[in-house]
Amino acid sequence: MKLHNLKPAEGSTHSEKRLGRGEASGKGGTSTKGNKGQQQRAGYASKMAHEGGQMPIQRRIPKRGFKNPHRVSYTVFNLGQVDQLVEKYGLTEFSLDNLYINGLINQSALVKVLGAGELKSAITFKVNAVSEKAKAAIEAAGGTVEILN
């Protein structure tokens, strides 16, 4: 076997369809696009959500409710959960970076700490929001709280 003898495996390659190259190509005349109409013309691209003249689904279904564009959504951690996470991951600081590195939040998440449960160790918190009860419990355990903006 030599380099000039090499061929691809049987059936692994296909000849390219040569459209718009006359009758001899076997696809001549209409180039496999049928007769007349928008879809055979050059530059055709169907509109998003076009349903061929049928009333589109976004117009058939009624509007409901209200989505507040100014809503701030937090990922919530209770003090009981924080204590478990500190033991599991060996955290000395409860910050957004540490939570992201350990796969507990995504990069754009905002974190709020709530006061349910007990905190046994003194930890530094660097989060976006803390409830009053949680702040009092953290400081009672000897930790500190820093609010990020």
Image (cartoon, grey):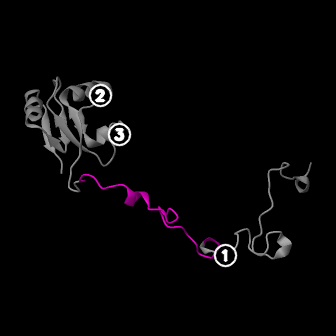
Residue at image x 23%, y 37%?
76
Mark 1 to mark 2 CA distance (whole Å): 70 Å
Q: Which residues are magenta?
A: 39-67
**Numbered mark located on residue 36 in the image:** 1
Residue 97 sits in which quadrant? top left
| Residue 35 inside the magenta-drawn segment | no
At numbered mark 3, what does the secondary structure look like: helix, strand or loop? helix
Q: Where is residue 9 drawn, in percent x and y?
A: 84, 48
Q: Where is residue 20 drawn, in percent x and y?
A: 75, 75
At numbered mark 1, what does the secondary structure look like: helix, strand or loop? loop
Which residue is labeled 3 in the image? 101
Against 56, residue 110 (above or below) is: above
Q: Main secondary structure of the magenta part?
A: loop
Select label 3 or label 1 by which is in front.
1
The amino acid beneath tag 2 is Gly
Residue at image x 19%, y 41%?
126
Against 23, residue 105 (above or below) is: above
Is tag 3's residue or tag 2's residue first in the polypeptide sequence? 2
Left or right: 13, with 73 as reference point: right
Q: Nearer the viewer, residue 123 or 55?
A: 55
Instruction: Verify CB contact (< 8 Å) between mark 3 and mark 1.
Output: no
Q: Where is residue 86 drawn, in percent x and y?
A: 26, 28
Is tag 3's residue or tag 1's residue first in the polypeptide sequence? 1
Q: Nearer the viewer, residue 5 or 111?
A: 111
Residue at image x 26%, y 25%?
84
